[in-house]
Image (cartoon, helix red, strand yellow):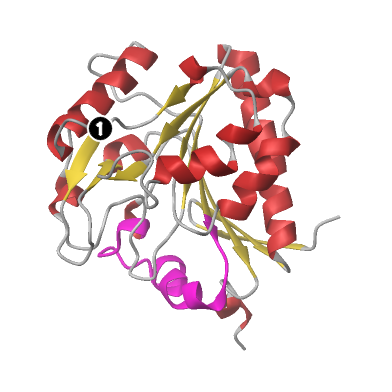
Amino acid sequence: MENIIKITLGPRKIYLFSTYYELSRFTLKTWEKISRLAIELRGHFTVALSGGSTPVGFYQNLSFYLPHTLWKKTHLFLADERFVPLDHEESNFRMIQKNILKRINLPKANIHPMATENTDPDTCAKKYEQTIREFFHSEKKIPPFDLILLGIGEDGHTASLFPGASALQETHRLVVPVQYEKIKQKRISFSLPLINKARNIIFLAYGQNKAPILSEVLEKNNQTLPASLVDPKEGRLFFFLDKEAGEFFHRD
């Protein structure tokens, strides 16, 4: 039985775990529960994944935790991507391929990478938006993903939405190109309107280095930070943190 502390701050459901193992295991169970319900109701489960180092261990566990009966009805998308070839060492898709896709038998039609080659970031973003709209059969409305898995940077960015970036002002596009002076590569990212339409959003964070920014987001609700702007009006918003990342909740 996991040792979990549950805290509710407005729409945010925060779960604090003693160890990363407990955090990962609970996330696996939550993923499975969401996916089973989605498949029961709609015949498939749609999930958008993030890159970075935080979810790597979880992705590896996920690859052998879920039964094939769920995987074959799961469609994987990317919430963001660096504008590099898909086999580049800094590609989010390459990381997901290494830690999930090479370990499972997922139908090729269920894998939806961002096509970054032979194009430019804006064209890539438009093509990926079209991919999403065609999959969901949604020409005008914003489609709801069953689950979007997000991380949070020490500067408060999430997906590839960075503080002060013009992409934060987007109100119509589902996928946006991102050029930000503090990052090395150009990127492509889900927009806030698309993220906030999700049925379920899970932030994963661990380690003491994430505590200061999580305090800004969860305690102070600093609205200059992209992570604070994630607010699914019709969905559920979870933060799964280990005790170091959520240490500010234990202050006297």
Question: At 44% across and 46% down in the image, what residue appears?
Answer: 50
User: Residue 204 location in percent, x, y?
Assistant: 54, 56
Question: At 16% across and 31% down in the image, what residue appears?
Answer: 119
User: Residue 161 location in percent, x, y?
Assistant: 27, 53
User: Residue 178 location in percent, x, y?
Assistant: 19, 49
The residue range painted magenta reads 204-227
Nearest the viewer among 198 and 122 is 122
Residue 183 position (above or below residue 194): below
Q: Residues within 10 Å of mark 1 (few under 14, many from 20)?
A: many
Question: At 38% across and 47% down in the image, what residue appears?
Answer: 231
Residue 163 is left or right of residue 34, and the answer is left
Q: For the view shown, which residue lies furthest in the right direction?
A: 1
Q: Is residue 2 magenta?
A: no
Quarter residue 6 falls in: bottom right
Residue 193 position (above or below residue 231): above
Residue 210 is left or right of residue 87, and the answer is right
Nearest the viewer among 86 and 38 is 86
User: Residue 4 location in percent, x, y?
Assistant: 74, 61
Nearest the viewer among 31 and 127 is 127
Q: Secondary structure at mark 1?
A: loop
Residue 159 is left or right of residue 11, and the answer is left
Image label count: 1
Residue 228 position (above or below residue 167): below
Q: Amino acid at mark 1?
A: Leu
Residue 32 is left or right of residue 229, and the answer is right
Nearest the viewer among 70 and 88 is 88
Which corner quadrant holds the N terminus? bottom right
Q: Is residue 221 magenta?
A: yes
Question: At 14% across and 30% down in the image, what residue appears?
Answer: 123
Can you identify the residue that label 1 sits on? 174
Q: For the view shown, which residue lies furthest in the bottom direction?
A: 252
